[in-house]
Amino acid sequence: MIKMKLNNILGKILGTDKLYFEEVHIEDEVIDEIINIAKESYPNEFVALLEGRVEDEILNISGLIFLPSDVSNEGAVMQVFMQPLTLNSLGSVHSHPGYNASPSDADLEFFASKGVFHMIIAEPYTRDSIRAYDSWGNVVNFRTI
C-alpha cells in the first residue's frame, strides 16, 4: 500500500503516473534484435531506446528506437534531445562488453532521467545475460512473448 502511494506521488511529479505496470512483456523479436546488435557491436557498446506502451497494467515492449550516439568499448552516449516527441519511448537498452550487466553510476543517472524500464545485456550476449532495471536501478523481472 505504501509502495503504491509512493509510486503514485512520484509518478505525478515525474509525469509517469499513467505508466503504472505490474508486469513487463517483451516481444521475442526485440530480444533477438538486442542480442544480434550487441554481438555485432562488440567490443563497443550499443544503446537504443525501448518502444512500447502500458495497457492493462502490462508494459509491452515492441521495438527499438535508434538515435545518434557516440559509442566505444567504455560507454555509449545517446543524443536523446533528438528524439521526436511522438515516439513511445519507455526506457533504454544497452550492452556492456564483459560479463557484468550491473548498472554503472552513469547508467543509474540515465535511468533516473529517461523512462521507467531499462535493460543491460552483457557477454556472452544471450537471453540469460540480459538484466532489467527500473528508474532507480532495482532489478525488474520480464518475460518474452
Image (cartoon, rainbow, N blue to C red):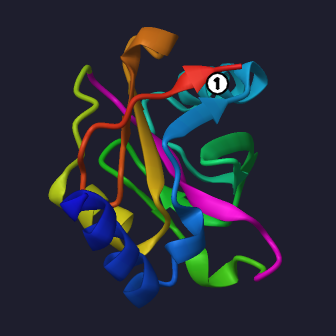
Q: Position of residue 96 (x, y in %)?
A: 35, 35
> Quick check: can you spot residue 127?
yes
**Residue lying farthest front?**
1
**Residue lying farthest right?**
86
Q: Position of residue 123 (x, y in %)?
A: 37, 17
Q: Amino acid at mark 1?
A: Ile
Q: Position of residue 6 (x, y in %)?
A: 26, 71
Instruction: Identify the residue at image location x=19%, y=51%.
Output: 104
Q: Secondary structure at mark 1?
A: helix
Q: Is residue 61 magenta?
A: no
Q: Position of residue 31 (x, y in %)?
A: 64, 24
Instruction: Identify the residue at image location x=42%, y=30%.
Output: 43
Residue annotated with mark 1: 31
Q: Is residue 1 left or right of residue 9?
A: left
Instruction: Identify the residue at image location x=51%, y=59%.
Output: 20
Q: Is residue 93 magenta?
A: yes
Instruction: Identify the residue at image location x=74%, y=65%.
Output: 88
Q: Quadrant of residue 1?
A: bottom left
Quarter placement of the C terminus: top right
Q: Which residues are magenta?
A: 85-98
At label 1, counting other C-alpha atoms closer than 10 Å, the crowd grade (few under 14, some 14-19, many 20 or more) is some
Look at the picture and state if 130 lies above or below 54: above
**134 or 45: nearer the viewer:** 134
Look at the picture and state if 74 lies above or below 40: below
